[in-house]
């Protein structure tokens, strides 16, 4: 195979990736790794400096004479605006270009009121978080929604808790006020990616994240990447039926989906049927902590029913870790115990040999982290950076680009 030229491999966007990963931190390093000439390196670095994506420091170590200017990725070179919408809690934040949360507001929004109500409130909150920052500081925006999302279009196809949003293409509605790249994904997908990249990426490559809150959903990390399936419908674990569910009608129209018998909504319904006065999951937490026998029975049963479905997913996907997140999983240890009991009993010996089942390490912050990374991975991808320097708009890709990570040196020109 013929050798590609250095200029084809090492665009400005590629050079930024080298700087972000620390593989090349001086102009000489860039020339050595890529084979680019000094003028070519200078041109690419100048473009990145002009964009504010790179800064240089002349205080680095020297082997004699003036020390070389060291280049570093500038996480403060812009912000991304993100929102993680949920049925019971919505988080809205502004993050820097490393995904670090700079400001955040948590709101109780009735998402069923629809995009005409929720999106203006979301964007008004972003404006408050921005404060005096100019619009030019905003590099992109991202949103996680409790719905199946056709990622390439940012269109919700079927909504678990937001029926009024079904069929809505969200990015143009946001871009009309914030003219930046806008990305939308399923809420559990972004939570799963946030949890994985922030807490597990150094340990494993395959992870199943199960959100147990008002509703139940899942996000699948396979080989370090989110698995969406052909049309974005992967991870709809909540609509897998269970045995002995009691004939409960699910919102999707089927009977005994695990979402209808083991979610927070189902737990509240079953406790009320047993005479317990519970108005919210907080009331259930109080009863669990008090050791109420009826409550413990209902929660443990929900965990076992959920465990049936998770066991099937473990057999099919063979993840290294199953992470249980969401309000219910984070507060109800009997549910987690019920899941573990069934998964280890029902899954194959090989799939559970080293399997870990644990609660979320990030908790409520995973959605914000995942949304920020979703945006950053796209707006700082080499093609997107090159297009920004050239002044050419870039279409939203159909999948997440791979995040910046250390790699082997690029081939040099012959």
Image (cartoon, helix red, strand yellow):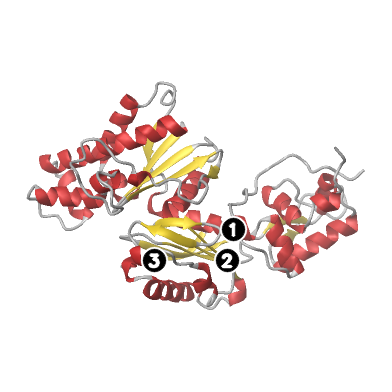
Identify the residue under disc 2.
Answer: 140
Q: Which residue is pictured at 77% across the width and 65% down the height? A: 47
Q: Position of residue 27 (x, y in %)?
A: 82, 54
Identify the residue under disc 3.
Answer: 165
**Along the polypeptide, which appears first: circle 2 or circle 3?**
2
**Along the polypeptide, which appears first: circle 2 or circle 1?**
2
Identify the residue under disc 1.
Answer: 376
Q: Which residue is pictured at 92% across the width and 43% down the height? A: 414
For mark 2, give the secondary structure: strand
Q: Position of residue 357 (x, y in %)?
A: 38, 34
Report whether residue 320 is seen. Answer: no
**Disc 2 crowd, CA 10 A, few/some/many (<14, 14-19, 20+):** many
Report whether residue 237 is seen. Answer: yes
Q: Residue furthest left?
A: 275
Q: Is residue 355 left or right of residue 394?
A: left
Callout 2–callout 1 Cβ contact below 8 Å: yes
């Amino acid at each position: 195979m013929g050798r590609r030229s250095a200029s084809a491999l090492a665009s400005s966007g590629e050079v930024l990736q080298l700087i972000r990963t620390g593989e090349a931190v001086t102009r000489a390093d860039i020339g050595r790794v890529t084979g680019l000439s000094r003028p070519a390196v200078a041109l690419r670095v100048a473009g990145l400096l002009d964009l504010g994506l790179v800064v240089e420091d002349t205080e680095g170590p020297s082997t004699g004479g003036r020390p070389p200017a060291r280049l570093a990725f500038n996480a403060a070179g812009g912000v991304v605006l993100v929102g993680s919408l949920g049925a019971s809690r919505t988080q809205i934040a502004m993050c820097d270009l490393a995904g670090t949360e700079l400001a955040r507001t948590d709101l109780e929004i009735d998402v069923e009121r629809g995009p005409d109500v929720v999106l203006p409130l979301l964007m008004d909150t972003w404006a408050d978080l921005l404060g005096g920052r100019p619009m030019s500081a905003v590099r992109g925006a991202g949103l996680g929604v409790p719905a199946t999302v056709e990622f390439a279009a940012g269109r919700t196809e079927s909504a678990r808790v937001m029926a009024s949003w079904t069929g809505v293409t969200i990015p143009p509605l946001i871009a009309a006020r914030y003219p930046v790249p806008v990305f939308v994904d399923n809420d559990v997908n972004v939570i799963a990616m946030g949890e994985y990249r922030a807490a597990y990426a150094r340990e494993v490559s395959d992870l199943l994240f199960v959100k147990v809150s008002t509703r139940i959903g899942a996000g699948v990390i396979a080989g370090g990447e989110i698995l969406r399936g052909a049309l974005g419908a992967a991870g709809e674990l909540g609509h897998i039926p269970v045995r002995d569910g009691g004939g409960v009608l699910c919102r999707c129209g089927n009977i005994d989906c695990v979402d209808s018998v083991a979610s927070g909504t189902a737990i509240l319904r079953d406790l009320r049927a047993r005479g317990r006065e519970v108005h919210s999951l907080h009331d259930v937490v109080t009863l669990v902590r008090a050791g109420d026998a009826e409550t413990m029975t209902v929660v443990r049963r929900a965990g076992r029913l959920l465990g049936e479905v998770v066991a099937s997913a473990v057999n099919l996907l063979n993840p290294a870790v199953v992470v249980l997140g969401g309000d219910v999983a984070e507060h109800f240890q009997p549910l987690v115990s019920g899941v573990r009991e069934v998964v280890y009993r029902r899954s194959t010996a090989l799939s559970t040999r080293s399997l870990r089942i644990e609660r979320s390490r990030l908790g409520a912050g995973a959605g914000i982290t995942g949304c920020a990374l979703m945006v950053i991975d796209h707006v700082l991808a080499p093609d997107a950076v090159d297009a920004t320097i050239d002044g050419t708009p870039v279409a939203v890709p159909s999948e997440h680009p791979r995040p910046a990570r250390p790699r082997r040196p690029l081939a040099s020109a012959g």
